[in-house]
Image: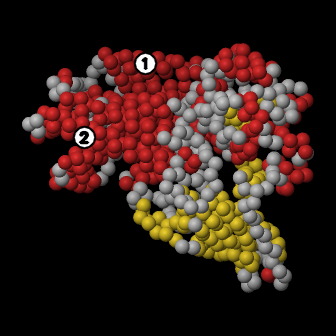
């Protein structure tokens, strides 16, 4: 369980969606022929001050290890594993609970190969992880492409060195590998228009990050929910009574209870800071649509849901809480109170862990580097308030609800909700990779079943292992059941194409639905930039580009809340060429594209890589949704626009382009 918790914390950190452009590691690559039928593929890196690059073979439980990967290896084969050369630093990492190895200033990775033919053609790369004290890069690549004649042919080997020098490249389609397929007009379509766009935007740059106050409220709500669980609520009167009984001076008891509450805040805020500082926002976008990680989070929430439903109890090792409790008894003063609060965090993990996990996953995807910390601050304040409040006004304890079966009802209800949200993560992976196993009607069918069963449970028609045998439906539970069943009925028309704006952020897009009776549908005819621009030129229409993503929550909100408006739909469908470019589309390109960005050579391997590169290089943006209006030559006709559900403002934006 200890390893599962550690891995969970790291994976949560990898889900946020705000990318910063950093390039702290600079590689040169080379093939060195050893003249004996063998050679070395050399990846030499210089590392900026304050940064470090992790070594090889750290295992699955640790940070990103350096690893060798082959794209093409004709005329050669690898010998052994990737070797790291340099001054390796070993240090025990408390979070990973393991010894990690890394390099500062410089490192050289070497992969030995053996030639099997006189001529060779090699395309390979080293994937590595780099971090500083505040943030980490997403998994990055250093590529080596080289072809020539080896020493097997008794001739001088052909060596090729790729440096990180700046190269002028306006279009990946115009790279050497595709030069014969591209016209100069295509290159012009990729020409940067950042300054033109800024002139239109002025000081009103679009943003999509969730406001901190909203994240704080989400955390506060999560904390209040955690209060009323069987692991937390029964502890409150016991703890408050302890402070009141051991201090004859009531003011001192209040001070100690307040200190106890503040300690709770500090503990959970430190957890949020750990998530923030481990990787930072720069690394949190890389794996947001990765199938493995989204499936992992789906399964994680399913496990949490099963625990809440009563299948098993998720508890941390009892030795942890025992040792901390003993330590608190043997110490005095502030440290003793802090250790008592830490004991509460450990003991209540079976109830708070799933809520914290769900909260961190939710806020990390908003893209703000401080989101996990702000969310945990709200959670901790809600959790700490009762301890201080009841210490100040002990009489309130008499009127507080007693522990009972109602707390298990809250746990089971949370289990149903986490089960529903687990499908959201599975949906992201399904959309990004085009599996079509969770299209919109399948997703809605599962949600209808989940919330229908929740309503049945609240009415007492279904019971779980920890429920009382004589459990009756009280008035609050009746109204909750009515709300759940009403929500179930609300979703049913969605099976025939109703927009369901209330859940548009979670359900798959309308274009995944096979049966749709809705007449007003706004859907892009083009999902390829060059094809859409060619159509605009042929029809002499302006273009609106929708940079979107399968896993983009706000994109779905805009489509359901704004694009479904009849006036907006009419303009988009009839007066514009609408092009939707999915930056997380994992479809492999027919031929990988070589580009140089910020002085660093990169390979675009998927359709999403290509459109993300277009958005960054041409428009200087990397957030979604991102809307920009162009003429048929690729120049902006108005400013850009991001997430904003103001329909009239969106209509004004479209009219400017006309």
Question: Which residue matches tag 2?
Answer: 260
The answer to which quarter of the image holds residue 582 is top right
Residues 165 and 303: in front is: 165
Say whether residue 214 is visible: yes
Specify few, some or many for label 1: CA neighbours under 10 Å numbering under 14, 14-19, or 20 or more: some
The residue positioned 68% from the left and 45% from the top of the image is 586
Measured as percent of width and height from the top left, residue 424 is found at 54, 35
Considering every residue shown, the one lying at the far left of the view is 248
Identify the mark at residue 301; answer none if there is no mark.
none
Question: Which residue matches tag 1?
Answer: 483
The answer to which quarter of the image holds residue 633 is top right
The residue positioned 37% from the left and 16% from the top of the image is 479
Residue 532 vs residue 520: left or right? right
Residue 208 vs residue 589: left or right? left
Measured as percent of width and height from the top left, residue 327 is found at 21, 54
- Element type at marker 2? helix
> Along the polypeptide, which appears first: circle 2 or circle 1?
2
Say whether residue 69 is visible: no
């Amino acid at each position: 369980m200890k390893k599962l918790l550690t891995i969970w914390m790291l994976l949560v950190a990898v889900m946020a969606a705000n990318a910063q452009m950093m390039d702290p590691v600079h590689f040169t690559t080379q093939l060195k022929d050893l003249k004996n039928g063998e050679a070395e593929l050399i990846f030499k890196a210089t590392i900026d001050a304050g940064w470090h690059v992790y070594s090889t073979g750290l295992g699955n439980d640790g940070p990103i290890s350096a690893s060798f990967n082959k794209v093409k290896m004709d005329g050669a084969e690898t010998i052994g594993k990737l070797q790291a050369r340099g001054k390796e630093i070993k240090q025990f990492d408390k979070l990973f609970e393991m010894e990690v190895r890394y390099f500062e200033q410089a490192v050289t990775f070497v992969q030995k190969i053996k030639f099997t033919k006189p001529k060779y053609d090699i395309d390979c790369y080293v994937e590595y992880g780099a971090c500083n004290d505040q943030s980490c890069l997403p998994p990055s690549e250093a590529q080596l492409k080289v072809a020539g004649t080896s020493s097997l042919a008794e001739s001088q080997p052909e060596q090729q060195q790729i440096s990180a020098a700046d190269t002028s490249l306006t279009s990946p389609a115009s790279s050497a590998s595709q030069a014969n397929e591209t016209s100069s007009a295509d290159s012009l379509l990729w020409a940067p228009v950042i300054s033109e766009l800024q002139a239109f935007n002025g000081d009103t740059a679009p943003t999509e990050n969730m406001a901190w106050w909203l994240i704080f409220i989400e955390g506060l709500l999560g904390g209040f929910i955690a209060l009323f669980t069987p692991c937390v609520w029964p502890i409150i009167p016991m703890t408050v009574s302890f402070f009141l009984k051991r201090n004859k001076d009531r003011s001192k008891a209040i001070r100690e209870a307040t200190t106890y509450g503040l300690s709770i805040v500090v503990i959970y805020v430190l957890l949020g800071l750990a998530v923030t500082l481990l990787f930072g926002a720069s690394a949190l976008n890389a794996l947001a649509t990765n199938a493995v990680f989204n499936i992992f989070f789906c399964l994680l929430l399913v496990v949490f849901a099963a625990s809440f439903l009563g299948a098993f109890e998720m508890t941390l090792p009892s030795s942890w809480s025992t040792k901390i409790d003993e330590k608190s008894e043997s110490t005095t003063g502030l440290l003793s109170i802090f250790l008592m609060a830490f004991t509460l965090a450990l003991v209540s993990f079976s109830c708070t862990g799933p809520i914290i996990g769900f909260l961190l996953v939710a806020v990390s995807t908003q893209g703000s580097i401080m989101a996990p910390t702000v969310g945990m601050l709200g959670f901790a304040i809600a959790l700490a308030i009762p301890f201080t409040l009841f210490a100040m006004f002990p009489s309130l304890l008499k009127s507080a609800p007693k522990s009972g079966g109602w707390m298990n009802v809250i746990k089971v209800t949370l289990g149903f909700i986490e089960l529903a949200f687990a499908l959201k993560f599975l949906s992201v992976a399904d959309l990004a990779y085009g599996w079509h196993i969770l299209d919109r009607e399948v997703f809605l069918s599962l949600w209808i079943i989940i919330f229908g069963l929740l309503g049945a449970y609240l009415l007492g028609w279904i019971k779980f292992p920890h429920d009382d045998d004589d459990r009756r439906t009280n008035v609050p539970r009746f109204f909750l059941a009515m709300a759940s069943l009403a929500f179930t009925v609300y979703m049913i028309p969605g099976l025939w194409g109703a927009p369901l704006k209330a859940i548009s952020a979670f359900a798959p897009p309308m274009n995944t639905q096979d049966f749709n009776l809705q007449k007003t549908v706004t859907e892009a005819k083009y999902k390829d930039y060059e094809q859409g621009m060619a159509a605009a030129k042929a029809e002499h229409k302006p273009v609106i580009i929708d940079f979107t993503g399968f896993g983009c929550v706000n994109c779905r909100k805009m489509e359901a809340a704004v694009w479904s408006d009849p006036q907006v739909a009419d303009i988009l469908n009839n007066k514009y060429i609408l092009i939707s470019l999915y930056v997380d589309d994992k479809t492999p390109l027919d031929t990988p594209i070589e580009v140089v960005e910020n002085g660093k050579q990169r390979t675009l391997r998927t359709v999403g890589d290509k459109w993300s590169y277009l958005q960054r290089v041409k428009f200087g943006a990397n957030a979604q949704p991102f809307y920009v209006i162009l003429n048929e030559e690729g120049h902006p006709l108005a400013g850009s626009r991001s997430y904003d559900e103001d329909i009239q403002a969106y209509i004004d934006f479209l009219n400017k382009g006309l």
